Image (spheres, rainbow, N blue to C red):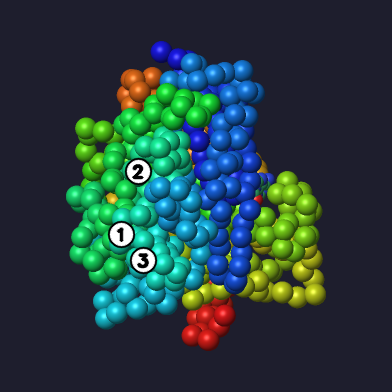
Amino acid sequence: MPEFVMSIDQGTTPTRAMVFDHAGRTVASGRKEHRQILPRPGWVEHDPVEIWDNVREVVGVALSRAGLTRYDTAAVGLTNQRETTVVWDRRTGLPVCNAIVWQDVRTQQLCDELAGGGGPDRFRAVTGLPLSPYFSGTKLKWILDNVPGVRARAEAGELLFGTVDSWVLWNLTGGPDGGVHATDVTNASRTLFMDLRSLQWDEATLAGSGVPPAMLPPIRSSAEVYGTVHGSQLLRMVPVAGILGDQQAATFGQAAFGRGDAKNTYGTGCFVVVNTGPEIVSSGNGLLTTAAYRIAGQPPQYALEGSIAVAGSLIQWLRDNLGIVGSAAEAEALAATVPDSGGAYFVPAFSGLFAPYWRPEARGALVGLTRFVTKAHIARAALEATAFQTREVLDAVNADAPAPLRELKVDGGMVANDALMQFQADILGVPVVRPRVAETTALGAAYAAGLAAGYWSGLPDLAANWAEDRRWEPRMENAERERRLRLWKKAVTRTFDWVDADVR
Ligand SMILES: Nc1ncnc2c1ncn2[C@@H]1O[C@H](COP(=O)(O)OP(=O)(O)OP(=O)(O)O)[C@@H](O)[C@H]1O
Ligand SMILES: [Mg+2]
């Protein structure tokens, strides 16, 4: 058996390839960012061809940094930014338009129309999701309705739909030359088209949305051999054996296999996932019900999820759009020059508000401003926003779950920020725990692929790899925590109802 497993993590911001060993340690990695294409307010696109080029490049970088070849690689796992929608021609391999990214809100009106008299929860019983531009379904419908010629080509069987996992898998396994068109249950559960119980496409929903079923990928488990890498690639003949959407991959990488196990990943957005085991739990508090993972031949596992659209991307916005910092590390240092946010609260409702509010018509607001407020306060308010949003999602989790969470396992790029993690523990009132491998997203996909390839023997093997790095205990007084939360919630209400029918 080769000694290593390769993970490809196609994220919203970068694409990463990471090589892991049997102990779950990172051996080498490659990373490259792709362009964020922002044609209009609220629209976010990626170029699927650029993404595929980057996948090949980072795989090459990771292999060469580790001094490895395909003979050292037992399997490849894939994880991906979820919901982002690609439509391409099965003969040429060319996308019909840019990918519409999960953050894109262009389909809000389409959602209102589809809701009709049924309201935004019309599809919740079957799919676990509210109607929102966030999910792939209305993005696909938008492409079918708006890109010239696409509907006719789709109906003629010429076009394929996929989330980014499907796009990368199809290309890795040969593209027009026999590429495998498939997705896994976790990605399919984010489309608005999958029946959570049967784990199959729901024909009634598809018919109601006017989507030709032949363009959808078959839904497979999260850990099985889908195919082997095509002969034209560096990893030729290596089995592609794991697919998990990024948040489910992070849950898997945190070894959160038991009912009630939870994690929060702080990346571009921020996502709390709570494992509910084989049970489908419906939230009364704004959480999504979603597939957590399915190992081939075993029953599916489900989760409740609190999705936050903007977390680390707000720090990137300070850098790229305002130019007040040169990097995320500089934002951390700038925020550390002041003891608090000086009364400022920053609610980054750039894509509307996700959990627990689900207000697509909200837009961002920076409130509580006085002449006292400096860019350091704004940097601090931007960081604190992630902690406040997480607190509101955990309140929803605690309202839905039989027992309150006693601690929060965290991962992702922002958890490098120790002051933010202390503030997070303060605002939550429970400890925050960081594992030794913070790249749990890539690790989770490696785990799924390694399980299917027999590189790891089972879940206990994976759980044994988990180790604590650092823990933050809450230190803030209750009264102060409650005061800050009250102000945060007031700030949130200032973002509501911003988009009128004629706002462009
Ligand atoms: N020291 C820091 N303080 C605050 N935020 C930080 C810090 N370092 C990195 N970040 C933020 O973390 C994010 C990167 O995290 P991570 O690498 O987990 O995201 P990602 O995997 O690239 O995201 P995605 O997969 O969603 O595209 C960036 O948005 C960046 O702004
Ligand atoms: Mg990521």
Which residue does the image show at 35% across and 31% down from the upper left? 227
Between 464 and 320, the one nearer to me in the picture: 320
Query: Which disc, if any, is residue 181?
Result: 2
- Point out the image quarter for the C terminus: bottom right
The label on residue 156 is 1
Dot 1, how many residues are within 10 Å of its Cα: few (below 14), some (14-19), or many (20+)? Answer: few
- In this rendering, the answer to whether 147 lies above or below 9 is below
x and y, in percent, of residue 394 in the image: 44, 55
Q: Are marks 1 and 3 in contact (CB under 8 Å)?
A: no
- Report the disc number at residue 369: none
Residue wearing tag 3: 151
In which quadrant will I find the N terminus?
top left
For marks 3 and 2, give the one nearer the viewer.
3
Amino acid at pointer 1: Ala
Q: Nearer the viewer, mark 1 or mark 3?
A: 1
Residue visible at 75% across and 75% down in the picture: 370
Amino acid type assigned to the residue bearing label 2 in the image: His
